[in-house]
Image (tube, grey):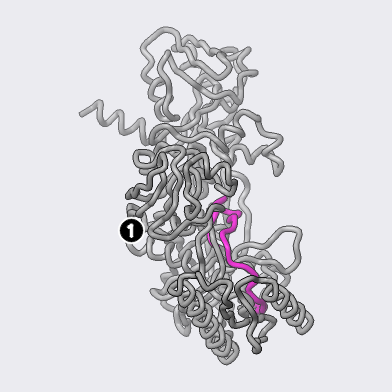
Amino acid sequence: MLSCSVRTLRRLKFCCNNLPFLLPSSSFLLAKGYCFSKPRVVSSFCNIDSKYLSFYVGERQSSLRQWRTRSLHTETDAFSAIELALDSVVKIFTVSSSPNYLLPWQNKSQRESMGSGFVIPGKKILTNAHVVADHTFVLVRKHGSPTKYRAQVQAVGHECDLAILVVESPEFWEGMNFLELGEIPFLQEAVVVVGYPQGGDNISITKGVVSRVEPTQYVHGATQLMAIQIDAAINPGNSGGPAIMGNKVAGVAFQNLSGAENIGYIIPVPVIKHFIAGVEESGKYVGFCSMGLSCQPTENVQLRNHFKMQPHMTGVLVSKINPLSNACGVLKKDDIILEFDGVPIANDGTVPFRNRERITFDHLVSMKKPNETALVKALRNGEEQAFTVTLRPLQPLVPVHQFDKLPSYYIFAGLVFVPLTQPYLHEYGEDWYNTSPRRLCERALRELPKKAGEQLVILSQVLMDDINAGYERLAELQVKKVNGIEIENLKHLFQLVENCSTESLRIDLDDDRVVALNYESARIATSRILERHRIPSRMSVDLVSEQNNSLIDSAS
């Protein structure tokens, strides 16, 4: 650590000596492998706005005071925090069973897994969503106790990889303490990760420091949210355990970097609070907001000149807008977004964050509550304009995940129809991007919905019978029309087929392929095909409910 500190000091001296407007003062603070210097202004930079300079220096000094205070606080309370965690952290035992998307009428074999969690105010347990995903049975065990208690999953947010569990047994809560949520740690601050990683049955405590704070890809939910990188090992079983700084929680351990040593990630407090607040306000997980925009950086000078950006202007170019977002009726393609809620956006799409750090402006969007508004300043045709945009969570055309729910399907004459989802493509193996049907893969990753409730319905497979002989090569094609009517989703296809009043049923597929069936013969064949393949139902549960509702409406 000493060599690292000296090297850091030398680098900072070199940088300061080469800056045109900052010179190092005679004193440096060297602590914990982190080096600070107090900037001072020289005459060559006297044209800087004094308000901005005083704000900058004040921010640096304020951050430094916070860092020193919190560092001393962390060292003083380290042992008491660990003692507190022992009465809060629990081991979670999960039995889960994932759906089989190639055979959607059945599940895969059940599996057992373990994770960690900790008690939060309100007699609740916070853990990772992937610890309890597709669960069928959940148990929790306190530290030092041989007894396991039944737990129920109250809320799950797969995008942010968080879940809340509740335990009804009063005996479980005897002697348990809750942990309070703290703040985002500064770089090089020490954190303690507590959990039950693989390699043993008892609780494990590891220590590390914060290396980086920035938006990161959440593997479980395939979303981009803020995360904290630490140099403490986070192994299977650690997931859901707290990362403690001082006597409060700095984050929740949830993933590591594959192929690297001692690089782990924790979910920061702002994301945790956003998840918990949404559950408390609405009783369920509400998601993270999005503007529904695809933006391009404007780092190229010619690009900025083309869109009439003044030298003092910075921002990003709107290249695509989700038709279902509120921004679709407000912003336009080729607008330049200059500010979001009064915060200037740089040409690379980042905004200021804490002390001389930057973060993508998507973080500001994701921290908004559903149906909350934001003031967006944009440049359109060379003129600055202000717009109010309502933010809400948006669903993609092809769902990224389908945890905790059964897949939808409909079988008619041995033709198996399903909505396209990424979990369906994942059934092609770990290298699904290259091994799955190319056209379906491209649509899943790039196409946007045109209307609410829209799905891409595909003919996933053909269960062979005399009625469908010759159609087996049409599997994995998208369904376009039924009897000349464009389908919107699987329920719409189901209704069109069930209510067919013509002798012949025509189904138009991708590549201008056509399936034609004698309707009555196909209905009769469906029963024998289901019996031959031991399939309990020709439709999924959600379509059964749709059919029952239709029968009730008809009777009334």
Of 32 and 417, which appears nearest the observer? 32
Give the residue furthest to the left.
Answer: 556
From the viewer's perspective, is residue 41 above or below residue 307? below
Q: Which one is nearer the viewer's eye here, 179 or 290? A: 290
Percent coordinates x, y for residue 420 in the rendering: 54, 34
| Residue lying at 20% horizontally and 29% vertically, measured from the top left | 556
Is 491 on the left or on the right of 239, as rendered? left
Say which residue label 1 marks. 282
The amino acid type, in three-letter code, at marker 1 is Ser
x and y percentages locating residue 138 in the rendered image: 52, 62
Q: Quadrant of residue 461?
A: top right
- Residue at the outermost top position: 503
Q: Which residues are magenta?
A: 204-226
- Give the image location of residue 353, x and y in percent: 51, 67
Check the picture and name the quadrant holding the N terminus: bottom right
Q: Residue furthest right?
A: 3
Report which quarter residue 355 is drawn in.
bottom right
Disc count in the image? Answer: 1
Relative to 536, 208 lies left or right: right
Residue 102 shows in the view: yes
Q: Position of residue 253 (x, y in %)?
A: 59, 68
Is residue 135 visible in the rendered image? The answer is no
